[in-house]
Structures are given as structure tokens and as C-alpha cells.
Amino acid sequence: MNPSGSSNSPQSNPPKREPAGRGFNWWWIYLFILTFLLFPLFSNIFSSGEEITWQKFERDILPRKAVEKIVVVNNEKAEIYIKKEFANDSAFKDVLKPAFGKGESPGPHYIISIGSVESFERKLDEAEKNFSADERINVSYVKKTNWTWGILSWVLPFLLLFALWNFLLRRSGGMGGGVGGTSIFNFGKSTATLIEKQKSNITFDDVAGLEEAEMEVREIVDFLKNPETFTKLGAKIPRGVMLVGPPGTGKTLLAKAVAGEAQVPFFSISGSEFVEMFVGVGASRVRDLFKQAKEKAPCIVFIDEIDAIGRSRGKGAFLSGANDERESTLNQLLTEMDGFGTNSGVIVLAATNRADMLDPALLRPGRFDRHIYLELPNMKEREEIFKVHMRPLIMDDTIDIHFLAGQTPGFSGADIANICNESALIAARKKREKIGRDDFLDAIDRVVAGLEKKSKIISPEEKKIIAYHEAGHALVSWLLSRVDPLVKVSIIPRGKSLGAAWYLPEEKQLRSETTFTEHLCATLGGRAAEDIIFGEVSSGALDDLEKVTREAYMMVTYYGFNKKIGNISFYDSTGQRDMGIQKPYSEETGKLIDEEVRKLVGEAYERTKGILQQNKESLQKIAELLLRKEIIFKDDLESILGKRPETSVKKS
Ligand code: ADP
């Protein structure tokens, strides 16, 4: 019962993004260049004359002696210019009228396509044979090159390639985590989200149950508010604070609360956003982030999942090519942190759940020298967190916060926030006026085991197997005193599972060898019950067997519970060793470990079967009740088995 998951926090603000340099639209430039190139083409179109045939020219234009000159262009066409004095002549009025403005069009006014220059000259001579020398038309020859098409045919492919490249970059940037809409002009920019001071309205009031951590970060708030009190005495303020803890324990929340309390801007970025497909992007983003932060000082920079860049350098370098990029990003981060003065007003908060994986350089004094450990909340802290998240809810009097906190051991703050929200959704779906205790219990079940799937089709035979399987778990855990107390058993499919037994784990820091073995037996109870009742086993125990194997290996290799292996632990708290590649023990020890684990699980299985054989009648009764009611509670079990036996041995 240790679900993880994040919640949709009621306090989170819609963040304001400020990636610099994005206001300028490059498409304007493209449009400008294109218009510039196309302009001559259009101007040509506007000024070109009416296309006519030689016959029309010879019949209608030539005899009127209106032609001023003829220009033969590129030996292909003859451009005919009409004398200005014919502007009022009805035949030429239209062609002499300019496309824009006043006066007369400069021409050419008519165009004739000519087959060849020789035949054109011949025809003209023929047509003009009765003309006097003065009346003969001047003919000149020119060569014109159309630069527009020339330039376009060169530039257009480049423009197209450029546009395509830009488009692809945008696409890949969008998918690769560059949330700010990466384009080639800003992919080195930081994608940090900036929450301005007036918008960060989260305070320590919204953070519950993290008293010690809160005390530690209060000092930062004081510094950001009144730096002189500290600097006056020559004190140096920490530049970096590392928040370490499992997901959902409120690391981001605490950082936001610091910013909210101190009323300073808050930059938030995830470590993975530094890592892109381009080499050097990470480092340049770090540079940019700190540049922006310094401009806004005093402020807080929050780097979530810092392990994405801050993992120990050099480790596994031969395995991943991405290592170089991560290393240069980390180096840049270290340089930046060394670069700004202790009292510059930029404080970096970073969060991780794997502090052991981080590069020692990152943790040395002067960088992230303060470490604040956040843990999963205990009973009292859970009560506090429930209170915070129940503030906006409308609830009836049946809600008992103490009881709810008791039902949620191992839950993180995010899980509790999620339960509160789920319960409101469940109550709303039932069209209730107020949220009740049942809604909360349903929400807890849902968070633990997923949504009920009553529609899942299960045959009666399967249902019977599931009932006996769950009854096996229930009975064994009931009879073994060190297994956590049972709350309820259900054979309604939920999430991925077909049935489930709910336990209420007691919050203890130490577990004895006996507790471990009894736990193994309870987990094997389902398979053992199938074995006894049906004489064969099903695939339904996959999850159980996985758990049993993991625990059994932990008992032998980590906790030194095995006599033959002795008081030796192969646990690696630094996370530096890759167990998949190099085992820290010899081959013989490896074999011995496997043998001992198999023996341990085998013995636990035999013991479980023995317990069930002795109580076969009770097993059948529980299974039948389950088949009838689908869900049974502790009281139902008590009515069949009597009160749960208490041992004289103090539990641990
Ligand atoms: P982390 O950064 O440790 O993964 P978050 O700070 O993002 O976790 O927590 C997610 C949400 O869980 C928060 O927005 C908040 O609603 C809730 N939460 C977690 N811890 C606490 C707490 N101690 N008090 C109140 N709410 C909490």
C-alpha cells in the first residue's frame, strides 16, 4: 500500500513563461524578401502592351502612321510604341492610357511575336514600300535579361530548404521537452517557467507537516527579505539548498512557499529540460537561466529532478553517448554557481529523490551545501496535510481526519491531495450535497488499487479461483500475528488486479526476521490456497511471486538474515555500482544466494500450506462468503474465525 502519484494542486498558478527573444516573427523577413524579388516581375506585367498579330498591325495601325518606333527584343518579339499625339484618337486611347496615374503610358503599347528577325524585316519593308523616308518606322534591336527568374531559380530552393529545416526544428523541439516551443533562434535559451512575485501566493500555510524542513528554509526567506541583517555581520548565505525526498512529499511546494513568503520571483525548471538532442544546448540553457535570474535578483531558481543532469560524472561513460552533453551541462551549472557571489540574491533550490546518485562536486560547500530531507509523512503529519487540502472542500460531519490519516500509511502529500480531490469528484458523481466519509474511503481505495471494473467479464470458475486465492491471503495473514492487520478483502476487479486484500501497515522503522518470513507466508497464501483446493495453480499469483522473490533476495543479500551467507550486505547506498554488469560477489556466493533464496521461499510455502490444511474449513467459509458478498471486512472474518490471536511477543 504505497501508491505514488502526483496531484493536481489547488494552489498551482498558471505559470507565466518568459523565454526571451520570441516576440520577433521571422516570417516577415521571408515575406519581405519574396516581395522584393517578385516586384520586377509584377512591374513587367503592368507595363507590357497588348499582344496583337502582324495582320492586325499591318491592317489597323501601320496605315495610320501612328507608330513612333519598334524595338525588337531578344529577336523574339517586337514592341510597338505609339506616338503621343494619338492620345485622343479613339483607336489608340485605350492603349495609351497609363495603368496608374495621369498622362500617357510610356509603352510599349503593342507586342507582336515574331518568327524570325529576317521575315519580320521583310514583311515590314513590304508594308512600308509606299512610305516616304521620313515616314518609315525606326527599328532598334535590344537584348533584355529577366533577372527575376534567374534570381528566383537560385534563391527559391534555398528558401524552401530553410523553411523546411526551421519547421522540423520546431517540431522536434516541441517533442523533446523544450516546452517553450523551440525554434532555431532560441533553442539555447532557458525554458524555465517564471512565476512573478505577485503571482506566487503559496505560503507556509499551504505546507503541512514539514516542520523541520520549514524551519530550515525560513532562514532563506529571512535573507531574501532582509539581506542586511546577515551581511552586516559578515555572514554568507547558502547559494544552494538540496531538497531530498520521495516523489510527492512537497519539495516543489516548499520551494514555491519560500518564494511566496519572501515575495520574490520564482524560476522553475526541470533537470530534464536541459538535456536536448543538440550538443551544447544544456550548457547554454544553464547560462541563460542564470542570466535571467541575475536580472531578477533577489529571486529563487528551482531545479526539479536535478539528478537528470547532476548524476556522478564519468560513471557509465562508455555506455551512453549522452554522457558528454550531461557532463558539460553539469559543469556549466557548477561554474554558474561559483560565478555568482554569495550575496547576489539568487538562491538555487534543487530537488531530487536520489541524493546518493549526485556528483559530489555538486554537494560540496559553496554549492548545494544544505541538504533538507523530506520523508513520507507520519500519522500526525498526514492529519495536517488532510486539513490543508480539505480547506476548499464542502464536507459533512461524518469525516474523521484522524481515522483517514490512519487509513493512509505510506501515502505522500501528493497522494493525500489526490484523495481529497478524488473524494470530491466521487461525491459529485453521486450528486451529493456534501462529501462524506464513504467518498473518502472510496477515493483511498481508488488511489491504492485503481478504479473498480465491475464490467470485466469473469467466468464463474475464475471467480471461484479468485475467491479462494484472496481467502488464502486473508486467512494466513489473520493467523500469523506479525502480518499487518487486515482491513478488507475484495474480489471486485480493480485496475489491473482481479482481487485484493487491504492491510493497514503499522508505522515501524524496524522489522524482524520473523516479520519478514510471516509476510512471505501471507503473500504466498493465495497460491497455496489454490494448490490445496484445486490441486493445480493459476497465473493469478504473478504479482505475489514477484513480491516474494524481491523480499527473499533482500533478506539474504541485504539484511544478513541468512546463516550461510552470514552478516554480509551487498546493498549499495551510493548507487555507484551497476549490479547488472558487475556483481559484488563471487560465482559460488551467487549460487549459494540463489539456493538459499529458493530454500527460504520453499519453506515459507510449505508452512503456508500447512496452516491452510489445518484450517481448510475456515478457508472454505471465507471463500464462500466472498463469493456471495464480493467484499468482506474485518468483522466478517471475526465472525468466522473469532478474534485475531494476539501474541505474547511484542511485535516488531
Ligand atoms: P515533489 O516536488 O516532492 O514531487 P510536490 O511539491 O510537487 O512534490 O507535491 C505535489 C502536491 O502534493 C503539492 O502541490 C501539494 O498539493 C501536495 N503536497 C505534497 N506535500 C504536501 C505537504 N507537506 N503539505 C501540503 N500539501 C502537500
Image: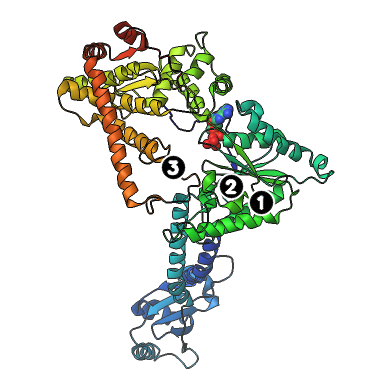
Give the secondary structure at mark 3.
loop
Q: CA distance from mark 3 to mark 1?
A: 48 Å
Q: CA distance from mark 3 to mark 2?
A: 42 Å
Identify residue for label 1.
Answer: 292
Task: Indicate the position of residue 327 as horizontal and vertical percent values.
Answer: 53, 58
From the viewer's perspective, tell me whether residue 295 is left or right of residue 580: right
Whole-percent x and y of residue 140?
47, 88
Q: Is mark 1 within 8 Å of ligand 1?
A: no
Instruction: State the residue position of label 2.
Output: 192
Distance CA(mark 2)–CA(mark 1): 10 Å
Q: Quadrant of the N terminus?
A: top left
Q: Is residue 317 above or below residue 611?
A: below
- Counting from the top left corner in percent of width and height, residue 545 is at 29, 33
- Give 495 or 291, whichever is nearer the viewer: 495
Instruction: Give amino acid for label 3.
Output: Ser
Numbered badge on residue 19:
none
Q: Crowding at label 1, few (<14), some or many (≥20) Cα neighbours within 10 Å?
A: some
- Give the number of the mark in front: 3 or 2: 3
Left or right of 421 in this view: 620? left
Q: Which residue lies at the image location 53% right of the left edge and 45% below the top edge? A: 356
Q: Are marks 2 and 1 in contact (CB under 8 Å)?
A: yes
- For label 3, the residue is 569
Question: How far across and how far down the image is residue 629, in percent?
Answer: 27, 11
The residue at the point 52 percent across, 12 percent down is: 400
